Amino acid sequence: MSASRDFWPSSGYHLLDRDATGKLRVTDEFLKAYLARPELVPPKDACAAERELHGSLLRDPRQFVAAARIAAISDADARENWQTMVSWRDHLVKHRSLEAAYLEIVRRNISFPHVLIGQLVHAILRNALDDCGDVFTIRAAEMFFRPQKLVIGRGSIVAVDEEMGSSLDRLPRSPLVELLGLPATSDIDLLDDASVATYWERSDRFDMGLGLAADQRGQAALGEVVRRWLSHLLAIDVTIEALTELRDERLSWYVGLSSDATRIGDAIWNGGEFSDTMRTQLVGLFRLTFRDPAEMIERVRGEPVYLLMAMTPDEVLRLKPQNLVTGLPIRDEEVVH
């Protein structure tokens, strides 16, 4: 499919504006959407101070909120939720774009709830992929903000949304049945040429499995997501090649795309044994090359960068897209947008 269509309405993308550079600008409508979160909607027994604050922010979501207004809320959990929300709102509105707000969080290791940062990644990716018509790439991008349960068998690896899989409490059905020999008891379909057209109308359901084995299209699609992510956030141009295994490659530089991948990369870097357990956990390997080597730090200029992707021992994949921002050998991060 060559033309892009709408997807991920839940990202909040359509509540945001885009500036002249294509970055996302925070709007009042986007800020008000947070006030619909169940943690912030006052329950029936909420105190007057909580109800007043919620209603006031619905009218003017950018207004100054004095600490005393939050302190006046009687419920301790509600006070904590509102403190977090106001701090989050203040962080978003003080930056020229959502992308800039995200970069500062990552580079300065600012502590915000994972659910809020994941929602930010969701919106930024929706923007970065706006002209993308390849469903495999869009499905692979879900892995940047939603953990995946990996279903492994008969030489195949299929990523299934962890939350979706848990809610179903059963394994994927046909056509995964034929691939893996599993019972047909689930509502998850494998993304393939036959099912690809159905993705657009169900994109917010996160209910399609993605093949990640070497002979499946998910690996290349994930590489394209990484390329677009780096181009959009850091304005650097790279090529990415999916590799089948780690053999004699010299790791002049590497980035772990998950915590387990970083641990494996550290072990190899420090001359440790690449054990069978590590080999089993390593479910993705990519070679990244800068099109302009001058963007790299001098020590490894012109060398490839290896991206490692590894699952947890219980076969869950939790990608950390922030590692691509902080881990690449970029000469001067302050020159990027």
Image: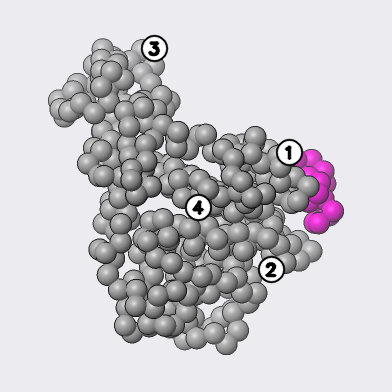
Question: What colour scheme has been applied to the protein in the rendered image?
Answer: one colour
Circles 1 and 2: CB atoms closer than 8 Å: no
User: How far from the left and from the top, in percent, is residue 92?
Assistant: 28, 40
Q: Earlier in the sequence, mark 1 or mark 3?
A: 3
Q: Which mark is residue 144?
A: 4
Element carrying mark 4: helix
Query: Hey, which quadrant is residue 90 in on the image?
Result: top left
Q: Nearer the viewer, mark 1 or mark 4?
A: 4
Q: What kind of residue is marked 4?
A: Phe
Which residue bears the numbered disc 2?
214
Q: Alpha carbon of mark 1 to alpha carbon of mark 3: how far?
A: 36 Å
Q: Please name whichever residue, 42 or 337, is drawn nearer the observer in this view of the structure.
A: 337
Q: Residue 258 placed where, x, y %?
A: 49, 62
**Lateral position of residue 159 relative to residue 49, left or right:** right
| Amino acid type, residue under disc 3 in the picture | Lys
Q: CA distance from mark 3 to mark 2?
A: 53 Å
Disc 1 marks which residue? 187
- 39 vs 329, nearest the viewer: 329
> Distance from label 1 to label 2 (Cα)?
25 Å
* Mark in front: 3 vs 2: 2
Q: Residues within 10 Å of mark 3 (few under 14, many from 20)?
A: few
Q: Which residue is mark 3?
A: 44
Q: Is residue 241 left or right of residue 86?
A: right
In terms of sequence position, does the residue under pointer 3 or pointer 4 come before the other? 3
Q: Which residues are magenta?
A: 173-188
- Above/below status of 139 relative to 226: above
